[in-house]
Image (spheres, rainbow, N blue to C red):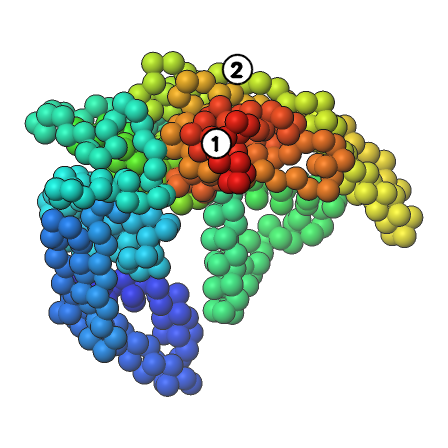
Amino acid sequence: MLVVAPATILLKFLPAFVIVLVFGGSESPIKIWITVAIAVLAVVAGMVRWQTTRYRITPDRVELHSGLVNRQRRSVPRDRIRTVDLTSTFLHQMFGLSVVKVGAGQSSTAGKDGQGLDLDAVSGDEAERLRRELLTVPAPASGALPPDTQDPDTLGSDTSVPATVAPQGDTAAEPLELDRLSWASLRYAPLTVSSLAAIGALGAAGWNLANEARIDPRTLPGVSTATDELSSAPLWVAILVGVGLLLVVLVAGALVLFTERWWNFRLTREPDGTLRVRRGLLTQRSLSVSERRLRGVAVTEPLLVRLVGRGAQAGALSVGLGGSDGKDGGGGALQPPVPAAQAHQVATVAMRSPEPVTDVPLRSHPAAARTRRLTRAIVPALVLVAVAWVLSRVWELAWLGPVSLVLLPLALLLGLDRYRSLGHRLDGRFLVSRQGSLVRGTVALQRDGVIGWRIRQSWFQRRAGVVTLDAITGAGSGAYGILDVDPATAVDLARSTTPAALAAFTPGDPHPERR
């Protein structure tokens, strides 16, 4: 760690160091001295951090003490631990180290920013031992309430997994593999917005670095010749070549990012009752989610992935994975983008359900919901078309107005697809809802994982006679909406899902003053 910590700090300053040392020259000796001083301070900071950091695990808590000038004492109750994430960067791998990230959930008041604490860095064997130990909640003391009863954001549990004691099973048993990487999934890499956005961010950072170094890419050997040839070619040829080069860079970059992110991916069910996702090339990650904290699953289908590759991605909705819906490698992702049937199958297996969980027929929403979807898609398109016709007259671009008319059928198709995606279903175990078109998401929440309800109605919804029903849970983003249902359906759905929670608000209540 005496090497890893300073090296990690220095890597963040590497671009600045290169610019100063290579292009600073003898005219700016002060810049070189500043660079050396930063390097020395990074080494000293790493030594101080190693010398002053200690952690301790008791039957009740995980404690982390760190800092010399600004001392910190952080502590997380073990019954509030939701996830354990093992992360090993390339530098950590060189020394056989790993970072143990203990997730304590959104509502926890312990740990840094209320989210737990990081043990950086421990040996690989010790990290694996800590992962198993920390996800096993000790039995409550005599007369004490179970941890899940004390913690309001973890009410509800999978009926097949005890809520107070993690399933142990046979500790000598082998993990059960649920999914592994198929290189056929590479075809989805260029179709995800997050990958393309990451490549764009890297490109922008590289361009800024070149500007800081006073390098003009157009003057590089070979590039200048190609630029001169394109400048003499017709405009449409230059545009096509530019677009083609951009697509090549984006696709190649997306493939590289996908490979780094999902290399050696495996999803397993561990004997200690956890779902474990392992992946990564340069940075290896291992996320373990206790099944007793699992409140549901989500299957997301971005538009391009859904239309071109008929793909989807499953994610876990677990207490402690705030805002994670399984989107493209996010915190709760259980797998990379895969064929839709495989994603739905993984969601079903993850919830230990004998029947499909997310790939099920849904109840359609009223006609008013279709009208709202069409209105919200077509009206903005009409505004854009009107603006395009005005600009075509102002800028004397006769083709702009007619070309903009293509937005109208696209908006119509988008509105119809958004309505077709709407739906909900309530069965004996799950509340399922679906919405979205650009990113269609199907969420299946366990009925006993719903801890509250919220009914919202905008001014336009009041005129249409529909409402939005939000199911409140302690997992994922915290609330999952069922859009544009009629009020009676919303009330019946809430009452049927959690009858005990709404008993005080139903007719015949012996305490009417509570209504």
- Point 36% across, 71% down: residue: 17
Residue 336 visible (yes or no): no
Quarter of image, res 70? bottom left
Counting from the top left corner in percent of width and height, residue 467 is at: 64, 34
Question: Which quadrant is the N terminus positioned in?
Answer: bottom left
Q: Nearer the viewer, residue 196 or 427?
A: 427
Q: Which of 404 and 23 is in front in this view?
A: 404
Task: Relative to 116, say whether 193 is above or below.
Answer: above
Query: As shown in the figure, which amino acid type bears the numbered disc 1?
Result: Pro
Query: As shown in the figure, which amino acid type bears the numbered disc 2?
Result: Pro
Task: Tell me how far mark 1 sits from mark 2, CA to CA.
Answer: 39 Å
Counting from the top left corner in percent of width and height, residue 171 is at: 10, 29
Counting from the top left corner in percent of width and height, residue 98 is at: 19, 50
Question: Which quadrant is the C terminus positioned in?
Answer: top right
Residue of label 1: 510
- Point 38% across, 81% down: residue: 31
For this orientation, the residue located farthest to the left is: 172
Residue of label 2: 361
Task: Relative to 351, say whether 203 is above or below.
Answer: below
Q: Between tags 1 and 2, which lies in front? A: 1
Q: Which of 252 and 177 is in front in this view?
A: 177
Label 1: how many Cα within 10 Å (few below 14, some 14–19, many 20+): few
Task: Relative to 92, say whether 447 is above or below.
Answer: above
Task: Assign a secondary structure to mark 1.
Answer: loop
Q: Is residue 433 left or right of residue 66?
A: right
Q: Nearer the viewer, residue 367 or 27?
A: 367
- Point 53% across, 40% down: residue: 513
Label 2: how many Cα within 10 Å (few below 14, some 14–19, many 20+): few
Q: In this view, does 230 lie to the left or right of 166?
A: right
Residue 490 visible (yes or no): yes
